Amino acid sequence: MKRRDIDFNSERIDIDRDIEKLRNEFSRYGSGNYFLPVNNFTSALHLAMCAIDLKRGDKVICSVNSSPEIPEIVRHFDAEPILVDVEPKSNRLSIKSLKEILSNIKSKKLRAIVISHHGGEILNIEEIASLVKKRGLSIIEDGTESLGFDRSKIDSISDIRLFSLDTPVSTLSLFVTDNQSIFQRAELLSNHGIEFDKQSKLGYIYDVVDIGCQYRASQNEISIGIEKLRKIRNEMERRREIAKRYIDGLSSVRGIEVDRFNPNHTYSKFIIRVAKNRDGFAKELKEYGIETRLHYIPIHLLSYYKNKYLFRVNSFPNALRNFQQVLSLPMRPDLSSEDIDHIIATIQFVAKNRR
């Protein structure tokens, strides 16, 4: 029997080596002094809230058009998500609405803002930071849909940056920061709050110094993440090609609105606006074999938040108007030219024959 076969540390050495490979691949797209792979995005977001020491009664700003897991995690701390409207005909967080919230809420309980690049449309983080840093708010960035974009000018702005590397067989996510204390807190809590006695020669003496969870990524997930990162750039370029095809084919279709091509967009999603009866349009497309999605239903329309905070349907008018029209088309790098032609032709046909 070889020494490696009986060494309990050999598996840890292998994982550490793969984490370094993962970090090297990530460095092609983003930067950060401290880097922690975790088992899923919800874990990463939970660790971020722990790292800023979010407490009961605190408040966290997020877009009303966020993924539901963002306000969900805030509520798990018995804190309050403060929703911000989006821009007209866009899912970008409204700077005007953000200024109003910052002006209206003077409480020191306002602790952080969570920002996302919805669909791959890159936010103006510099402008957001110039507003919230005056109030001492932490900036937690969901950078998932920015991957592939040149982040060199924005990486140092956010206090914590989170990235999901979801694949059909892995939910790996990355927790990235430049703040050592934030990292140390997140790393501790990702492993049940366990600290090992570094002074002990035995190596197995440990203590539990806080209440954490098992959020560590497995070696298999890390290996899959390495391969995922190697494909990011090519996948983004392919999505941009598909977006151009969609824009060229749908720009003149009656009742359908698409934005102009944006070279700074990663096109993780492609969203069109349907002038009338979006749901009926989606149903017709489905009958022709084309699946569509909604990204996302505004938070204030979801039953839990509507009942908890007594939101009205029109509490966020821009988000409401957008929601009534938006529809996400298939946007996968593996779509063939024939697939794209079929989708465009079907949309043209359905739109032309609608009453």
Image: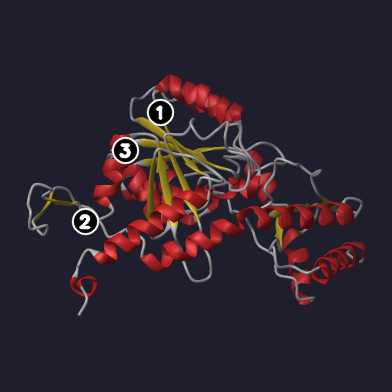
Point out the tag, 2 or 1, that comes first from the N-terminus: 1
Q: Would residue 321 be found to the left or right of residue 111 on screen?
A: right
Q: Which residue is mark 2?
A: 192
Q: Is residue 66 above or below residue 203?
A: above
Mark 2, Cα crowd under 10 Å, few <14 / some 14-19 / many 20+, is: some
Query: Could one spot residue 102 in this view of the protein?
Result: yes
Q: Could you tell me if the residues under marks 1 and 3 are in contact, i.e. CB atoms within 8 Å? A: no
Q: Is residue 350 above or below residue 78?
A: below
Q: Would residue 50 be found to the left or right of residue 121 on screen?
A: left
Kindly state the secondary structure of the residue where label 3 is placed: helix
- Residue at (59, 54) in percent of width and height: 297
Q: Would residue 216 be found to the left or right of residue 28 on screen?
A: left
Q: Quadrant of residue 137?
A: top left
Distance from Cα at disc 1 to Cα at disc 3: 14 Å
Name the amino acid type tagged 2: His
Name the amino acid type tagged 3: Ile
Q: Quadrant of residue 265?
A: top right
State how the image is colored.
secondary structure
Kindly state the secondary structure of the residue where label 2 is placed: loop
Distance from Cα at disc 2 to Cα at disc 1: 27 Å
Query: Could one spot residue 52 in this view of the protein?
Result: no
Q: Which mark is residue 137?
A: 1
Name the amino acid type tagged 1: Leu
- Residue at (57, 40) in percent of width and height: 315
Q: Nearer the viewer, residue 22 or 148?
A: 22
Q: Which residue is mark 3?
A: 182
- Residue at (47, 34) in percent of width and height: 158
